[in-house]
Amino acid sequence: MFEKLKSILVEELSLNPDDITPEAELANDLGINSLELAELVLACEEKFDVVIEDEDLHRFNTVGDVVNYLEEHK
C-alpha cells in the first residue's frame, strides 16, 4: 500500500520519491497544501475505490497515516 501511495504522490504531485517515507509529514516535510491534499484524496479514492470523508482528513498528518487509513477502509 505504501508503494502505491508513493507512486501517486510522485505522479500526481510531482514529489521527489526520496522524500517520501511513512514518517514524512504531508505539510511540513513534503510541502503539501490543502489543494494538493484534495488532489491526493481524489487520486486515492479512484485508485483504491474508497470514499475518504472530509471529517477524516485531520487524521492525515504523515504518509503513514494515509496508508493506515486506506488499509482500514479498502
Image (cartoon, grey):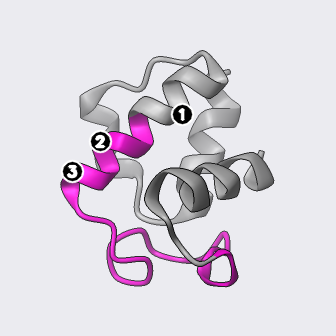
Real-space Cα separation, disc 1 to disc 2, in angstroms? 10 Å
How many residues crowd around disc 3 within 10 Å: few (fewer than 14), some, or many (20 or more)?
A: few
x 63%, y 74%: residue = 20
Q: Give the range drawn in magenta.
A: 17-41
Q: How many labels does the image show?
A: 3
Real-space Cα separation, disc 1 to disc 3, in angstroms? 14 Å
Q: Quadrant of residue 19?
A: bottom right
Out of 27 and 69, give the one closest to the viewer: 27
In the image, what residue type sits under mark 3? Leu
Q: Position of residue 64 (x, y in %)?
A: 62, 60
In the image, what residue type sits under mark 1? Cys
Q: Quadrant of residue 46?
A: top right
> Tag 2's secondary structure?
helix
x 50%, y 24%: residue = 45
x 41%, y 68%: residue = 26
Residue under pointer 3: 35
Real-space Cα separation, disc 2 to disc 3, in angstroms? 5 Å
x 54%, y 49%: residue = 66
Residue under pointer 1: 44
Q: Would residue 23 be counted in the magenta stretch?
A: yes
- Asked whether, in this view, residue 57 is left or right of residue 1, the answer is left
Circle on res. 8: none
Q: Where is residue 9 in the image (x, y as percent from the top left)?
A: 55, 57
Q: Position of residue 42 (x, y in %)?
A: 41, 30
How many residues crowd around disc 1 within 10 Å: few (fewer than 14), some, or many (20 or more)?
A: many
In the image, what residue type sits under mark 2? Ala
Which of pointers 1 and 2 lies earlier in the amino acid sequence? 2
- Asked whether, in this view, residue 2 is left or right of residue 64, the answer is right
> Tag 3's secondary structure?
helix
Residue under pointer 2: 38
Q: Where is residue 10 in the image (x, y as percent from the top left)?
A: 59, 62
Task: Determine contact: label 2, label 3, CB under 8 Å.
Answer: yes
